[in-house]
Image: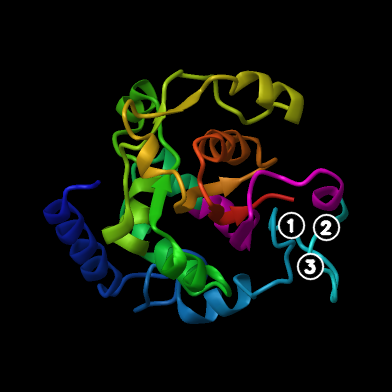
Amino acid sequence: MTNPLFAKVSTAWHRLLAGVPSQCEVCRAWPAQRICEDCVARFARPRLRCRTCALPVPVGVVQCSHCLRQPPPLDACVAAVDYGFPWEHILGAYKFHGDPGWAGTLGQLLRSTPWAEPVLEAADLVLPLPLSPQRLRHRGFHQTLLLAQVLAADKVDAKLLLRVRNTPAQSGLGRAQRLENLQGAFALAPGRLSDVRGRRVVLLDDVMTTGTTLHTAATVLREAGAEHIAALVVARAA
């Protein structure tokens, strides 16, 4: 599990940053949070989504036709927003330009999303999708782990699921190429099988594109005997 003292300090730090006035990243209002309440209301409106892949669906539809034909290894999937303006820019700043201060804002956005709170409350474990050591050194911090600590610090285990193979970036690849790229990329830490068997697990990521990465990780957990696997993501690409 994550060091409890580190998790407590990290969570307190993100809460402190969330309360510091600044300029809204979107409309430039001042003083505001990093994204003001008006912009959240405008650009983070709740949408009806497929319960297992989080793609938008029409009224009255619970699960999309693709998931009905080919059930994914996820029992539930919740996304806060669509991957478009302004979230694409914000997540890029957070993930690729060394701005970990976004963790508190994005974590609060995800927690306030319909169905996210019940998924977190029911979970035994919250697992941020792991980075390879090479990617972590390059980026300087694990952006999904910071989100996990904001959401459910007492349930986070960042050492159970491992990225055992450094893979090329998924961006620009089709689904078949992504699947091939991720073969053998994830594994459970040695001796941790009993920590997964019969447990309710939440996988956490910042962006879900085709779902290949989450599905590959979920398959490892399913084969280890996880009882229920849900995914939480900040943004879902169409």
Q: Position of residue 185 (x, y in %)?
A: 51, 23
Camera-nearest label, 2 or 1: 2
Between residues 14 and 153, which one lies in front from this camera angle? Answer: 153
Residue appearing at x 84%, y 48% in the figure: 66
Amino acid tagged 3:
Val
Q: Name the residue under label 3.
A: 62
Q: What stretch is highlighted in magenta?
A: 66-90
Amino acid tagged 2:
Cys
Amino acid tagged 1:
Leu
Residue appearing at x 60%, y 60% in the figure: 79
Q: Is residue 47 left or right of residue 87?
A: right
Q: Name the residue under label 1.
A: 55
- Report, in whole angstroms, how far the alpha carbon at label 2 lies from the one at label 3: 7 Å
Q: Where is residue 76 in the image (x, y as percent from the top left)?
A: 63, 58
Does the magenta portion include 19?
no
Q: Name the residue under label 2.
A: 64
| SS type, badge 3 | loop
Q: Quadrant of residue 129?
A: top left
In the image, residue 11 above or below residue 66: below
Residue appearing at x 59%, y 23% in the figure: 182
Between residues 220 and 64, which one lies in front from this camera angle? Answer: 220
- Report, in whole angstroms, how far the alpha carbon at label 2 lies from the one at label 1: 8 Å
In the image, residue 130 above or below residue 79: above
The reply to whether dot 2 and dot 1 touch (C-beta < 8 Å) is yes
Q: Residues within 10 Å of mark 1 (few under 14, many from 20)?
A: many
